[in-house]
Amino acid sequence: MAEEEVKFKVTIDGIPVEVAPGTTILNAARQIGGDIVPPAMCYYSKLEGSGGKCRTCLVKVAKGSEKDPRPMPKLVASCRTTVMDGMEVHNITSPEVIEARRGVVEFLLINHPLDCPVCDQAGECKLQDLSYEHGLEQTRFEFSKRTFERIDIGGKIQLHMNRCILCYRCVYVANQLTDNREHGIIGRGIHSEISTYIEKALDSDFIGNVIDVCPVGALTDRTFRFKNRVWFTKPVNAHRDCPTCSGKVTLWYKGEDVLRVTGRKDEFGEVEEFICDTCRFETKSTADWILEEPAPIDHESVIAANHYYEFNLPPVIQENKKLQLANEEQLARTERLK
């Protein structure tokens, strides 16, 4: 007779959920979903070892477990803290957590420039969302922000360290998806920065995924930069027979043109399956893909303003035979006057 699977009962903001032992508080909250899911800027479920750096996912453990009901003395990072049976967690119901999250957001914005109007990440930026929900009306930081020159770390990727929040996601991608990591964190404290080894270019079949995992606009796609605002594009899920990766992507259309290709992301903004650079950069024609359906978009996202849910929508301008005939007559008269 098979042994019954052990489950821990956890309560988050008054909502109970049963999860497997070893599950983190963050992933337990994700099983519930909705507003009680703590924000995460550095944790990425597909990347081993990620989390514990940005501190935006802080929560309050009001009850440790059934065996030891004492509360934890300090707020804990939910992405790194595993659940115990009978644990009670406060997230959005705790004023202490909300106040701490405001402080974390203020800290993240100390050196981050407010250049959202010219940033290609605008509309998809998690830091933008956090700033709107928890940011202050004005900064209390009186010193000069640290600045760096933009550098190209490969033919298709640009690094803008001014925007980097040192979440380490791109480093984990290079470590775990490629054969040779050529970039990482150099310096300490205020001087810490993402950089390559003597400005060596990043060149690997999967290195383009550093763009998808970056939560801010520090790593951007050079083939898409300044081509369009993301809320003017229409995302469509598609696939192709790729020998290197799954070939499952999201195509971002402007009219009939594919402006960029990204990995498909789930409701938490994480890529479902990492894609190769050939799919990302070299196949930007509809003929290269088999279209599936419009990509699902959160209704609260600015991208939803220009989104659609079915293919073959009726034309915006209906066909008008009378107007077409008048235009042809006008064109004929104009030709005679030339």
Image (cartoon, rainbow, N blue to C red):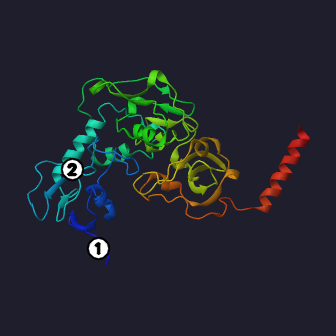
Q: Is residue 297 left or right of residue 75?
A: right
Which is in the foreground here, disc 2 or disc 1? Answer: 1
Spot occupied by residue 144 in the image (x, y as percentages of width and height): 30, 23
Looking at the rendering, in which quadrant would you find the N terminus? bottom left
Q: Is residue 272 above or below residue 50?
A: below
Mark 2 Cα shell of 10 Å, populated few (<14), some (14-19), many (≥20): some
Q: Which residue is mark 2?
A: 98
For marks 2 and 1, the one nearer the N-term is 1
Q: What mark, if any, has residue 3 been given in the picture?
A: 1
Between 335 and 30, the one nearer to me in the picture = 30
Residue at (45%, 33%) from the top-left corner?
A: 181
Between 323 and 219, the one nearer to me in the picture = 219
Residue found farthest to the right: 336
| Quadrant of the rendered image containing residue 12 | bottom left
Spot occupied by residue 17 in the image (x, y as percentages of width and height): 26, 68
Residue at (50%, 25%) from the top-left corner?
A: 200
Spot occupied by residue 108 in the image (x, y as percentages of width and height): 30, 37
Q: Secondary structure at mark 1?
A: loop
Q: Is residue 120 above or below residue 78?
A: above
Mark 2 residue type: Ile
Q: CA distance from mark 2 to mark 1?
A: 41 Å
Looking at the rendering, in which quadrant would you find the C terminus? top right
Between 202 and 236, the one nearer to me in the picture = 202
Q: Secondary structure at mark 2?
A: helix
Mark 1 Cα shell of 10 Å, populated few (<14), some (14-19), many (≥20): few
Q: Is residue 77 above or below residue 208?
A: below
Spot occupied by residue 243 in the image (x, y as percentages of width and height): 62, 50
Q: Is residue 216 visible?
A: no
Q: Is residue 272 visible?
A: yes
Mark 1 residue type: Glu
